[in-house]
Structure formats: C-alpha cells, structure tokens
C-alpha cells in the first residue's frame, strides 16, 4: 500500500448521503456573461452528478484556458484550472496515478481543438477513463471575439475582417478519427438531452468525448439557434438513438436514408419510403459513426445530435496497472537493496 | 613467447570506428571488466547524432574513451594513450586526442582505397610514414575474424559484426584483463542464438590469443587495483543512477513514482530504465510531446505521486509554461534537464552546460524554482534523491541539471546501504478543520498537499493568481505582490535547509576555481595537480544553483581571484557576480566536449 492508499483507506467509496445539485455548487461567484450557454451546462452537470453514486471527494474537474475552462471553479469537487490546451494531458497524468478518481475535462473549441488539439487526440486514442466536455461556441470568447477552429469558412470576426479562409474542424470527426470510444453531441439549450448525454458519458468506461453546442451571446450570438430554438430545431436536428431509425421533423415525417454511403433526407409521407428504409442507428458501428458525423457538413441535412459512437475497449490506466500487478507477481515487490546490487558488483577490501 | 609486463598507474584508451561497428558496446564491455578488476575509472562515450551515418565517413565515427588507473580517476582522460581505429575515418577524427608516442591499433583491412578516400586521405597513413611519432600496430582484424569463424557457415555480415570483439580481445590481452566477464555477458545477451555465442566468444578469444602469440606486441601492461574505499561497488552511468535515485526516493517516501516523458537525446535512457521497474510501481508514460510530459507529471503530483519529467534543452524550452504553472500551483514536480549542445537542435549527442540561466530564470514573470546539478555519473543518484526530497518538503517544482557527459559516462560506485539514505516523510493534509489550500507551513512556507479523494478538502487551484491562504482567484494588486514575494521567500528558505558548501583545498588563498555540474572531475584533477605543485588554489563545486548555499559568498570573499570554468559563455559567472558582486574570471569552452584538465591547469598557471 502506498502513502496515498494508506491515507485514503477510510474515505467513503460511495456518497454517505444522497446529494442534490446544490451540493455541487462551489462558494465562488460565477463570472460568465449573463445569458451565456455555459450556465446551462454547469447547471445540468450539477444536476446529473448526484445520480452517479460517486462521492464528491473522488471527483476532479480539470480545464485549460478560456471561458469554458472556468468551469472547475464553480463545481464543489476537486478542481484544477490548468494552462491553455493541456487539460487532457494533466488529466492523463492524474488518471494514471489515481485510477480511483472520476476525472472530467472542461474545454472549448479553441482550447481543445486549436492549442490543445494534440493532447485531445492522444487521450482519445489511449482511451483513459476521462470525460471530456467540449463547449463549442465557434468563437474565441475570453480573448474577445476572434474566429476559432470550428468557425465557419468566411466568418467575419475581429481577426478576419474580410472573412475567415480557414476550413473548420468537425469536432465529432476529430474524436472519431482519434478513435475515441464514446463520441456524442448535445445542446446547451436542451437540458434534458444534455443531462442524458452527460450521464451516458459518465457510465461509459473509456474516454468519452461530448461536443456541446454552446451559445456565446456576446461574440457569436445565435450560432446554433437553427438547431436549438423551438421554431427551427425539429426540422434541422435529428436526435439519434441506439437501434432506432433516424426520424425527424416537426411532424416526425422525415427520415435519413443511405444511398450508397451518402445519407439523404426522405419523406415518410409521399409513399416512396417507409421507416424500414431509414438508417437504424447502431452506436457500435464504426463506419456508420463516420457517416453520421459527416452529416454536419452536408447542406440540407439535419444535424445529428446524440450518442454517435460508444464501444468498449481496453483502458489505458487499467492496462498499465495490470502490467504493474503482473510484474509484482512475477518478480515480487521492488526491493531497493536488490536493485542497487543487481548485476555485476565487486568488493574492495 | 615471453613478453614484457609493465606496470602503469593510469591509461586512457579510445575505441573508434563506424557507428555500426559496435564501439560503444566494446567500450562498455572493457569498462565493466576494468571495474571488476578493481581499477578506478571514468568514461566518455562520443557518438554521432545519426544512428547509422554512411559507413566510412568522418561524421559517422563513434568513439568510446575510458580512463582507468590504480589511482583516483576523475575524468575520462585528456589525451589517450591507445587509440583503436577500425577505419581511416576513425583515425582521422581521433588522432588529435592521441598522445605523442601513443599506441595506434588499426584494422588494416578497414584501410582500403574506398575508406581512405571517404576519410580524405591521399595515401594510406599506415604505410606512408605520417604516423611515425606513434607506435602503430596494423592488424588485419577483419581477415583474422573471418579466419576464426571460417567453419561456422555464418554470413559475411554476421562475421563483420563480430570484429569489434577481436579488438576487445586484443585490448584485454594488452592490459591483462580477464575474458570471463565478457564471455558471461555474451552468453546472456545471445542466449536465444547459440551460434552468436559461439562466434563472439571465439573472436574474443582469437583477439586475445593474437596478442599473446604475434610478434608485433612486445609489451603488455598491468594496471593494479585502485585504493578505493572498502565496500561493494558497481559500475553505473549517470542516467541509470538518476533513474535509481528517483526509485529510491519513491521507496523511501512511500509515494508512487510517475514519469511523463517524451523521448529526447540524451535523456531517453532514464525513460528506458524506469520503464523496466514496474515492480516498484513506477508508472512511465511516454507522452505525445514535451508539454504533455510535464503536464501529466503535474497531474500525477496533484494526485499524490512523485511527478517527474525528463528532457533536454529543446524539450525544456517547451515545458516553460508548465513550469510556471507548477510554481503557481506549488506542487512537487522534478524536472530533469540532461543538457546537450544548443541552441535549437544544436548538438544532440554532445555535452554542454548552457541551460543554467534557463533553469534559474527562463520563465515568464517571477517564477523561482530550486535548481540542483549532478557532478558525476554516480552523483546523479543522490542528486535525484535530493531533488525529490526538496520538492516534497517545499511543495515546489525542482530542476535537476545533468548533461550528456555525466548522463552517458560511467564510474565505479560504492553502493550505498538503503538504511543510510535520508528519510523522506511527506504528509497529506486530511483534516478539513481549518483547511485552506494556501495556508502555509510556518517553517518551510510549503502549502498543504491535499490530494483528490480526501473527504472534505474539495478545493480549486489553478494558474490564476491566488489569494494568500484561501487560494481563491485574486486580482488584488497588493496580494499579487505579496504572493510573488512569498513564492520567492519559500525557495530562498531552502538555503537554510541544505548543507553548507565545502571547499576542497585551503579555505583561503590566491585562487578559487568554482564549478558546477559535470566539470567536477576536470576541475578537481587540475586543482589537485596544481596543489601538488604547491600552488595556492582551491576548488568549490556548487551542487545547489538556486538558491546558493548560505556560505558561498563568505567562501568567495576569502580568495584573491575566482576562476569559473564552464561549458558555456559564463553563466555561473553571471549569477555569482550578480549575487555577490565579486569579479570572476570565466574560462569558457563551448565545443560540445568536456574540459580537459590541462585546459584548466593552463588557465590556473596563467593566473598564478
């Protein structure tokens, strides 16, 4: 037993009492702009936490830099506000050292996909059991309004007065390309769905990547309103669910059908196609996950929202612990005296 | 045939050949055997950055120098007495390090037209008389190796690869060393390929027998054991010692060791070494980049492990921002910079000490970090141990400076007993009563280590300025200045805790030679030599570069002149002048090579 295990041996492994959302509110004043989508994300996370059956003292929220990265200050758990882009690497070190902890990363489109893109892809491929909430508002907020790696081509911002000539990242494709074992998208303005996805991510064993469409009402107001507002949402979002056909529309009268590898919208009322012709979502289907994620960049298709991909594969930290366990079984606990005297030695009298 | 046996006090041998010729291996085998027979020794591997540079070229030459003796040995030797040259390029590159009258053992078969041309020789130096001031032994090493293995049915390629052991066998004969340790090593190394055990053993023995029977060697030499302190010894390189020092600190402290590291020359061997020792619960994480190396280590430290990252200059530059974070968070992280020639990619496989100012000052804003340096390969063990100890006690990142010369060099090491190592007794905060993340220990000014998983201590930390005591984010002007001074005061206080600096030689005098890190052996040899001549010169070697030990100023003021030899343009000089307002004389060398003691002796002569 090391000193950490020794020190924490009596700490409760499950909550002593049932928490409420309020138990997860820290004593710090929340300093996001009034009306920011971050408030909703914070509230939904705080609402979901009591359901996870994890004691607060075993939870750690880690962030980088940016508006979203202030998140840990507002959670009454352990919190770590790191440096720009590095939260996944900090989380990796912590999770390897302490597999017993529930580790969460709060990041943004700039923090996670620009300066920290490297760490993000590597945590995904390694599959540490860390939950990543990427707040995508398609703008740099904290630096006051430059375009981000998810801003659309042609975006006019302070740093692109003639329009951005950068092609944007699709965060879901980045995560899938990096072989994250759980990839989902949800909306700041859909609390129920947001809660559902956070909970699914929490239950997933492995790196869970969630892209959250988040409104920056100061520098990029309404960027996602087509997908989040009542009038337009139903016709522009398809909520995907495991083993269910892709149906959407205010009257649930439209669906997504595959022609070859290309998804297209079909009507369910003109007699040509029925529900049986539609894509049935399968979270474990790797090829399908790419097709669904690609839909975001095909004009006239609704945005897929929900759990795009969820599979289980070996956890990095568990594999490392297994190797350590095996080494100890095979060679015995490390003995310093033996190590120092290992190999060729000689005695001088 | 009877041959003369001559006694020598010390010898320096350099093995040189193509980087594919196995010269490092040959040198290391000679080193192990020499250590086993009880000589004191010091080594200098010198290899190109390219893994296999084109054969026969001068830039592809790989060398390994060993200095051993029956007396105390502190450097790998200024000049060599024996040069083993496997081809013309090896001769060309290394001839300037050979003493006049020194011995050259050349592989005659390697001196063919093609290789001579590649090395830029117009005529064959083995035949044209240009080496007349040396004792040249041209031996058909390749042919003799082929002869020894003729009946084994091995491919030419495999046979060629054995020829270094012929040279090694000859050197074992010439310096009366036993073959058994290397034979044992061969048996272990090639246990899965018995034909290679047979081949290498045969060639090694053939080389030895050649020395015995041929007429070209009339003399063999004996170097008696050195009067080392009694006890059990082993040979150890700097990087091995550093890795083991970290493991020792982990064992003593009861904390797991976490290494986050990105491969970089010449630090990678620490990652390799630590990766072997999983039964010590060492967790090694080969990160995606240098930044992830250090930030993962910070994450692990935050969780209650000893977080370590290892790197060299360019990697150190990349870690800079994270070092500032560690200063702000006040978490124990050990950052090992195995310095190499720079700037930028510089000279990856060569040594230099030019990252001192980077270590002491190289961060944005006021970000004090303790800096300590290793003097010799074996000293890396204690330096690593000490780094962890300071990091844990003061809740601070610590920078450990080593260099390519110390890291790859080897020396005999009197194995310490585990009980003799100092205790490390870290404590985690567990009591929620009166807990504040930045409420400091009165004596050390360290903040509490409150690890996740502790009930009731949930708190938030980060890179934003902290309010004194509470650790809450604070933009208050007075608080910021207070905290800047507090972080500095904490590091300064370490000076009260570390042992006083010790002068080697008289406490007062005409000249004090002040060094740090890997120049220890060269300075010590130079100062010892000059003291034997009756000169008033002493040696001060600084292990602690930030903060300096409390008595450093007092020591400096006791000497008329201060000479600071450094493998940079005078970085320690700058620090000493700034802190103690003393004039210093810099002896600078920036060639990717360590000092020769003669270079320091010449400077001492000039000054006295």
Image: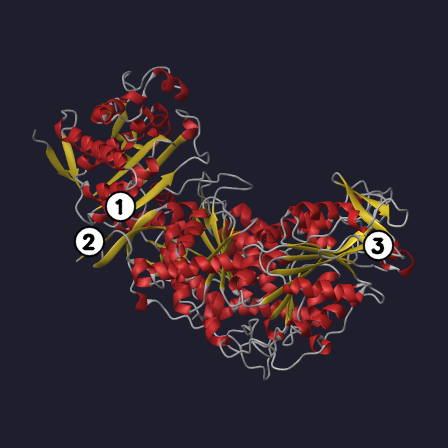
Task: Looking at the picture, tell me which residue is in the foreground, A92 or A276.
Answer: A276
In the displayed orientation, state which residue is furthest to the right.
A231
From what the image shows, is residue B398 above or below residue B177?
A: below
Circle 3 sits in a helix, a strand or a loop, which is it? Answer: strand
* Residue at 26% over, 40% down: B186
Image position, residue B416 (x, y; %): 30, 62
Work out how far the residue at label 3 is from the one at label 2, CA to CA, in angstroms.
Answer: 88 Å
Q: Are marks 2 and 1 in contact (CB under 8 Å)?
A: no
User: Disc 3 vs disc 1: which is toward the camera?
Assistant: 3
Front label number (3 vs 2): 3
Identify the image quadrant of residue B302.
Answer: bottom right
Residue shown at 38% from the left, 33% from the top: B62
- Residue B515 is at least partly visible in this image: no
Q: Point out residue A188 in the picture as x, y percentages from the top left corner.
A: 79, 62
Q: Is residue B235 left or right of residue B371?
A: left
Residue at 52% over, 39% down: B346
**Which image quadrant for residue A92?**
bottom right
Q: Is residue A305 left or right of residue B439?
A: right
Chain of the residue on which disc 3 is drawn: A
Q: What is the chain identity of the residue bearing mark 1?
A: B
Q: Which residue is mark 2?
A: B227
**Label at residue B32:** 1
- Lower position in the chain sequence, tag 2 or tag 1: 1
- Percent across and percent down for residue A23 are 69, 78
Question: Where residue B402 appears, x then y in whole percent?
Answer: 44, 51
The residue where tag 3 is placed is A248
Q: Chain of mark 2?
A: B
The front one of B230 and B589 is B230
Work out whether A247 lies above or below B103: below
């Amino acid at each position: 037993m090391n000193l950490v295990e020794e020190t924490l041996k009596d700490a409760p492994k499950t909550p002593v009492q049932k928490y409420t959302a309020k138990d997860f509110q820290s004593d710090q004043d929340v300093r996001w702009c009034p009306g920011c989508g971050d408030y909703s994300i914070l509230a939904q996370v705080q609402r979901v936490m009591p359901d996870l059956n994890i004691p607060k003292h075993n939870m750690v929220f880690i962030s980088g830099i940016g508006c979203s990265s202030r998140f840990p200050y507002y959670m009454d758990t352990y919190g770590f506000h790191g440096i720009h882009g590095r939260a996944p690497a900090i989380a990796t070190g912590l999770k390897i050292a302490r597999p017993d902890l529930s580790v969460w990363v709060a990041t943004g489109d700039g923090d996670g996909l620009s300066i920290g893109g490297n760490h993000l892809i590597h945590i995904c491929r390694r599959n540490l059991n860390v939950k990543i909430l990427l707040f995508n508002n398609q703008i740099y907020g904290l630096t006051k309004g430059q375009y981000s790696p998810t801003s659309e081509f042609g975006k006019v911002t302070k740093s692109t007065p003639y329009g951005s000539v950068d092609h944007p990242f699709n965060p879901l494709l980045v995560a899938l390309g990096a072989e994250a074992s759980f990839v989902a998208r949800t909306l700041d303005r859909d609390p129920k769905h947001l809660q559902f996805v956070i909970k699914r991510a929490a239950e997933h064993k492995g790196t869970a990547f969630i892209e959250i469409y988040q409104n920056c009402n100061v520098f990029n107001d309404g960027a996602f309103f087509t997908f989040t507002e009542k009038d337009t949402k139903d016709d522009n979002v398809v909520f995907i669910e495991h083993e269910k056909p892709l149906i959407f529309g205010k009257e649930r009268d439209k669906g997504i059908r595959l022609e070859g590898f290309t998804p297209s919208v079909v009507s369910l009322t003109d007699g040509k196609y029925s529900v049986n012709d539609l894509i049935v979502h399968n979270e474990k289907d790797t090829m399908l996950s790419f097709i669904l994620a690609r839909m975001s960049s095909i004009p006239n298709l609704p945005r897929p929202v929900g759990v795009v991909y969820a599979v289980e594969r070996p956890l990095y930290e568990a594999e490392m612990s297994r190797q350590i366990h095996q080494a100890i079984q095979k060679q015995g606990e490390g003995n310093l005296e033996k190590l120092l005297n290992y190999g060729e030695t000689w005695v001088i009298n | 045939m009877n041959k003369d046996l001559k006694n020598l006090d010390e010898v320096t041998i350099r093995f040189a050949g193509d980087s594919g010729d196995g010269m490092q291996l040959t040198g290391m085998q000679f080193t192990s055997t020499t250590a086993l027979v009880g000589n004191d020794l010091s080594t200098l591997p010198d290899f190109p950055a390219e893994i296999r540079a084109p054969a026969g070229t001068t830039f592809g030459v790989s060398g390994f120098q060993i200095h051993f003796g029956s007396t105390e040995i502190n450097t790998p030797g200024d000049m060599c007495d024996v040069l083993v040259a496997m081809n013309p390029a090896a001769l060309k590159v290394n001839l300037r390090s050979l003493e006049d009258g020194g011995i050259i053992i050349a592989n005659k078969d390697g001196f063919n037209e093609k290789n001579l041309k590649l090395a830029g020789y117009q005529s064959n130096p083995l035949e044209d008389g240009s080496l007349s001031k040396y004792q040249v032994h041209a031996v058909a090493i390749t042919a003799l190796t082929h002869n020894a293995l003729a009946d084994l049915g091995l491919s030419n390629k495999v046979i060629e690869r054995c020829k270094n052991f012929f040279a090694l066998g000859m050197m074992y004969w010439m310096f009366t060393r036993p073959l058994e340790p290397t034979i044992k090593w061969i048996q272990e190394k090639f246990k899965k390929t018995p034909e290679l055990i047979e081949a290498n053993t045969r060639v090694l023995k053939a080389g030895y027998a050649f020395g015995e029977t041929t007429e070209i060697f009339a003399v063999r030499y004996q170097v008696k054991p050195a009067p080392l302190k009694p006890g059990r010894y082993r040979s150890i390189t700097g990087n091995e010692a550093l890795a083991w020092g970290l493991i020792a600190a982990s064992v003593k402290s009861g904390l797991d060791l976490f290494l986050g590291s990105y491969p970089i020359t010449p630090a990678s061997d620490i990652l390799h070494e630590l990766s072997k020792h999983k039964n010590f619960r060492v967790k090694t994480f080969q990160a995606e980049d240098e930044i992830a190396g250090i930030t993962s280590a910070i994450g692990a430290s935050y969780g209650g492990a000893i977080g370590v990252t290892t790197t060299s200059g360019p990697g150190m530059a990349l870690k800079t921002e994270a070092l500032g974070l560690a200063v702000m968070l006040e978490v124990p992280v050990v950052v090992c910079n195995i310095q190499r020639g720079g700037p930028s990619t510089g000279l990856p496989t060569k040594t230099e000490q030019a990252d001192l100012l980077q270590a002491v000052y190289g961060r944005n804003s006021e970000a004090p970090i303790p800096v300590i340096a290793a003097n010799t390969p074996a000293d890396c063990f204690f330096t690593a141990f000490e780094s962890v100890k300071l990091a844990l006690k003061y809740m601070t990142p610590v920078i450990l400076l080593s260099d390519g010369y110390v890291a790859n060099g080897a020396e005999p090491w009197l194995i310490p007993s585990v009980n003799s190592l100092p205790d490390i007794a870290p404590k985690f905060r567990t009591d929620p009563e009166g807990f504040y993340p930045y409420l400091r220990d009165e004596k050390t000014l360290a903040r509490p280590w409150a690890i996740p998983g502790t009930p009731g201590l949930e708190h938030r930390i980060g890179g934003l300025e902290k309010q004194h005591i509470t650790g809450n984010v604070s933009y208050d002007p007075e608080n910021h200045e207070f905290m800047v001074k507090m972080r500095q005061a904490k590091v300064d206080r370490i000076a009260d805790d570390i042992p006083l600096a010790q002068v080697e030689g008289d406490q007062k005098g005409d000249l004090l030679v002040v060094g740090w890190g890997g120049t220890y052996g060269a300075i010590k040899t130079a100062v010892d030599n000059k003291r034997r001549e009756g000169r008033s010169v002493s040696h001060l070697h600084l292990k602690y570069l930030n903060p300096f030990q409390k008595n450093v100023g007092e020591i400096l003021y006791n000497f008329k002149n201060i000479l600071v030899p450094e493998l940079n343009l005078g970085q320690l000089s700058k620090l000493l002048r700034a802190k103690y307002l003393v004039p210093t004389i810099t002896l600078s060398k920036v060639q990717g090579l360590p000092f020769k003691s003669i270079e320091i002796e010449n400077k001492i002569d000039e000054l006295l």
